[in-house]
């Protein structure tokens, strides 16, 4: 069974920084593209950043220049470094990964980690 577990969320003041992590564990063959999404109350879940197996990255316009996605493949971990945080960045941040296991490629989600930015 594959699990994605996020950590590192919390409360930070506007202008501050936070780094969140997501570890993939369980039984699988490969990890494909990984991503961070977020969902604020009353809003739809939206993509924040993605990173492929070849470390090609893509960012939503609203985080470009402020957030950085990275991976440590030896630890099956994906990170999101968030700088210059704004109150509108407040949301639950979810980790997503495409995983290859015996059933083929499937998307998996973590349980989410709360990030709150105070003004």
Image (spheres, rainbow, N blue to C red):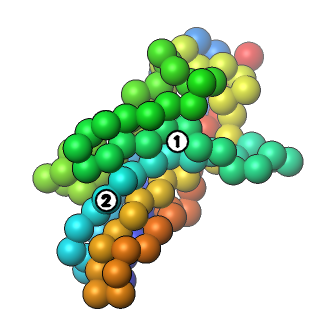
List x then y, in percent, for residue 5.
Answer: 42, 61
Residue at image mark 1: 9
| Secondary structure of residue under mark 1 | loop
- Quarter of the image with the C terminus in it: top right
Q: Residue at x 31, y 37 (%)?
A: 56
Q: With respect to residue 49, does 78 lie above or below?
A: below
Q: Residue furthest left?
A: 74
List x then y, in percent, for residue 11.
Answer: 60, 32
Q: Quadrant of residue 50?
A: top left
Residue at image mark 2: 32
Q: Which mark is residue 76?
A: none
Q: Residues at badges 2 and 1 in contact (C-beta under 8 Å)? A: no
| Secondary structure of residue under mark 2 | strand
Q: With respect to residue 16, does 9 lie above or below?
A: below
Q: Residue at x 29, y 80 (%)?
A: 101
List x then y, in percent, for residue 82.
Answer: 48, 26
Precedes in sequence: disc 2 or disc 1: 1
Q: How many marks?
A: 2
In the image: residue 70, left or right of residue 59: left
| Residue 13 visible in the picture | no
| Residue 1 visible in the picture | yes
Q: With respect to residue 30, does 74 lie above or below?
A: above
């Amino acid at each position: 069974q594959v699990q994605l577990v996020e950590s590192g969320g919390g409360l930070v003041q506007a202008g501050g920084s936070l780094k969140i992590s997501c570890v993939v564990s369980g039984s699988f063959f490969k990890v494909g593209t990984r991503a961070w999404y977020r969902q604020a109350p009353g809003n739809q879940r939206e993509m924040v950043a993605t990173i492929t197996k070849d470390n090609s990255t893509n960012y939503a316009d609203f985080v470009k220049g402020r957030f950085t996605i990275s991976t440590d493949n030896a630890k099956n971990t994906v990170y999101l470094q968030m700088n210059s945080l704004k109150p509108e960045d407040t949301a639950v941040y979810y980790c997503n990964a495409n995983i290859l296991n015996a059933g083929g490629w499937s998307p998996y989600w973590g349980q989410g980690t709360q990030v709150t930015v105070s003004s």
